[in-house]
Image (spheres, grey):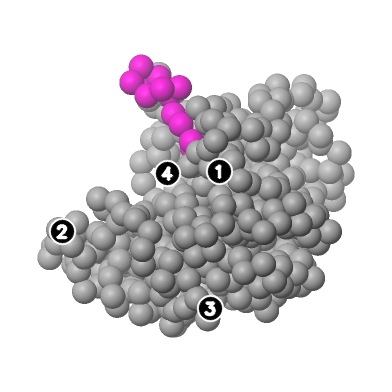
Amino acid sequence: MSWTNTADRRLRERAEAVIPGGMYGHQSVTLLPDDYPQFFSKGRGAYLWDVDGNRYVDFMCGYGPSLFGYGVESIDQAYIRRMAEGDTLTGPAEVMVELAETFTAQVSHADWAMFCKNGTDATTMALMIARNHTQKKTIVRARGAYHGAAPWCTPLPLGVTTADRANQIFYDYNDVESLEAAVKEAGDDLAAIFASPIKHDTFVDQESPTVAYATRARELCDEHDALLIVDDVRAGFRLARDCSWSLVGVEPDLSTWGKAIANGHAISALLGAEKARGAAAFVYVTGSYWFSAAPMAAALETFRLIRETDYLEKTQALGRRLRAGLDEAAARRGFALRQTGPEELPLIMFEDDADMAKGYFWTDALIRRGVYFHPWHNMFFSAAMTEEDIDFTLEAADESFKLLKAAGPLEPVGKLQMAHQALQMLQPL
């Protein structure tokens, strides 16, 4: 079946009449190639189908939640069984305590857990607890890092006041001197240092944390009686079976989790060390669906698979296979790629492509060949992927490189001007 997007275009027209802008948030395709599908019909294993029936090997995995693949029977059956008994009740079910026990046993720094729905819920809760624990206001966080879509951290400041962004100082990720300068500026008012598990900002090369940077962040928090917060919402359990900073030997006081912890079912979490338990007990945080039992049951089964399968080693091996194959195919066609970040959490961009015209053309060609890549956001693997899926992807990539070569000089991607303006807006008001 040839690729088409007729049904998707019709749905976009309908959506524009009843949804502001036609779509919002991370799934808005206004900053993606024009042919990227907006609407999808189903997902199974490593594959995603759009409303036109086109199938893709999905390297976005729902922007991260699909760790084991779409529609994992044992996970979904755990959800369904709990649904049959009751999901959102007047209070939580026993499964909440079991999940907290399981989660804290899995993550070495954690003594307690609290559950919510979105990553933004978890990071905002971490902010509140840090301020309550320290009785200080100022947080220090990396310039350009994403910690959610609440007024204090949303990337675009439209509708946000200066007061919403108050008491924040920025530093450059992995730059120890910059971090120290920000902490010095905070003085006696430092409540917390926020850190991403890796630098996974959009549009720019990814970086793993250096031991020197991570260790210094821990030391500065200890010196100033502040809390170290690692925002593991995006990378949690994709780099390690523990908090991602376990790879550099540093334990945070708080860590935030979401996306993959229930393989796509709606739940997120905040984990904390004993020292912050008292502060966590007295902040008021809640939500109508935060105690829903069915996603917790799905999370328990996801944790079993995390413990008992080789999903991590498999996705790492697939990542290495893809990275090597793409470099080889690109070189064969006369291109050079910048593949940054861990192999299992890659960002793939072109050298000598400041306006991203090459990247947009290439990823658009991949879409038409059944591969869902993102031109400027880090991507993900699911354990449902196989070596055959990677080989299919490499074949499609080679064909797309060939088309890119034949296309010659390309026009700049005008929509990226909006993207670069958005990046500038990440600074405090």
Residue 122 vs residue 418: left or right? left
Say which label, 4 or 1, has the lower sequence index.
Answer: 4
Residue at 46% from the left image edge and 31% from the top image edge:
24
In the rendered structure, are the residues bearing label 4 and label 2 in contact, judged by CB atoms less than 8 Å apart?
no
Q: Indicate yes or no whether the magenta region holds residue 21.
A: yes
Q: Amino acid at mark 1?
A: Cys
Which element carries disc 2, helix, strand or loop? loop
Residue at 73% from the left image edge and 63% from the top image edge:
208
Say which label, 2 or 3, has the lower sequence index.
Answer: 2
Say which label, 3 or 1, has the lower sequence index.
Answer: 3
* Mark seen at residue 162: none
Residue 290 vs residue 188: left or right? left
Q: Which residues are magenta?
A: 14-27
Residue 316 vs residue 271: left or right? right
Position in image of residue 314 (x %, y %): 57, 73
What's the distance in space between the residues labelled 2 and 1, CA to CA? Answer: 31 Å
What's the distance in space between the residues labelled 4 and 1, CA to CA? Answer: 33 Å
Q: Quadrant of residue 183?
A: bottom right
Residue at 59% from the left image edge and 41% from the top image edge:
166
Residue 95 vs residue 403: left or right? left
Please give the residue where the numbered disc 2 appears in the rendered image. 89
Which label lies toward us, 4 or 2? 2
